[in-house]
Image (cartoon, helix red, strand yellow):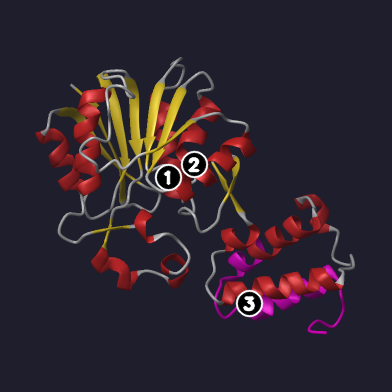
Amino acid sequence: MFVQTNTIKAIKKYIKEKLQVRFSESEIRLISNELMKSRMNLSTSDLLIANENLLSESDLLFFRSCVKRLLNDEPFQHIIGSTLFYGLELKTDERALIPRPETEELVEWIVSDFSGVNNLRIIDLCTGTGCIALSLKSVFDDASIDAIDYSLSALSLAKENSNLTHLPINLRQLDVLSEAAFSPKIFLPNSYDIWVSNPPYIPEMDKEKMEKNVLEFEPEMALFVSNENPLVFYKKIALDGLNFLKSNGVIYFEIHEDFGNETSDFLNEIGYKDVVIRKDLQGKDRMIKAVKS
């Protein structure tokens, strides 16, 4: 046996010893606790007094497998199968990007701006797991929210998350870069209060700077754009937004930290007003909003 005893205390020690070459002490503590809670169906308070609880052989093999997968750079969220986003537990796997804390900040910006407003019409473009659409639905329960993605795999995951959270959203497969993406027969012009998107925005040349756990385990189509046209999604979505947002409707984007000013300039050029760039908690330009004139 790879541990001295089959107790929770022993497996915690094993996890720490194996992962300390790759993770910080606080990361190891979080990983260990979340794995324990998930596998053993324990609460945080239960875990505090469970050190001497005995594990089965299958439990021990499960934790050893998790350690091997982590050392192979597989994302922790894929291993436990979920992540917490804006208070919602969402299923995560290779079908869509793992929701990031920066995107929670984008959601919070929208929630703050529209606090107390009823019957909103919202569209979330490049929805992925559905994290933005579902978070907004959890706050604006009477809102009508459309969630769009080109990837059928991502949409299937978003549908599972909609069912898991009991938050109904309108899912639709659509290539937002297509010239005929937004048909007036489907989307009513001048009818939306909010357009929001966290589209692909990482130039291909940035691949060499990225971690293996992103490059090998998350979908490239949700990450990368060409070096020659890194704002391709922003330009197309913003132009379409002019047709479908109400007067004084607001468009929100998560952005690449290097392209905030370029995105702002474009939004101003095509006729948006009150363009604002906001930094994330790491001090990077990460979000932008603009108002339809």
Q: Marks 1 and 3: CB-CB under 8 Å?
A: no
Residue 52, image x and y in percent? Answer: 89, 67
Q: Helix, strand, or loop for circle 3?
A: helix
Instruction: Out of 124 and 3, give the one closest to the viewer.
Output: 124
Q: What secondary structure is the stretch in magenta mostly built from?
A: helix
Residue 24 in magenta?
yes
| Other residues around mark 1 within 10 Å, as few (<14) / some (14–19) / many (≥20) | many
How far apart in space, not on screen, are marks 2 and 3 (Cα)? 29 Å
Whether 3 is drawn above or below 283: the answer is below
Q: Secondary structure at mark 1?
A: helix
Above/below status of 266 relative to 39: above
**Picture residue at 19% right of the left edge, 61% below the top:** 227
**Residue in the picture at 13% in, 34% down:** 268
Does 65 sit above or below residue 217? below
Magenta-span inclusion, residue 174:
no
Q: Are marks 2 and 1 in contact (CB under 8 Å)?
A: yes
Task: Residue 103: give its label.
Answer: 1
Q: From which residue to which does the magenta span run?
A: 1-30
Give the residue displayed 59% in from the left and 72% down from the top: 70
Gap between marks 1 and 3, in whole Å?
29 Å
Image side of residue 204 versus residue 87, left or right: left
Q: CA distance from mark 2 to mark 1?
A: 9 Å
Amino acid at the residue labelled 3? Lys
Amino acid type assigned to the residue bearing label 1 in the image: Thr
- Tell me the residue that label 3 is attached to: 68
Nearer the observer: mark 2 or 1; the answer is 2
Q: Residues within 10 Å of mark 3 (few under 14, many from 20)?
A: few
User: How far across and how far down the image is residue 192, in percent?
Assistant: 33, 22
Indicate which disc, 1 or 3, sits on the residue closer to the N terminus.
Answer: 3
Residue annotated with mark 2: 131
Of mark 2 and mark 3, the one earlier in the sequence is 3
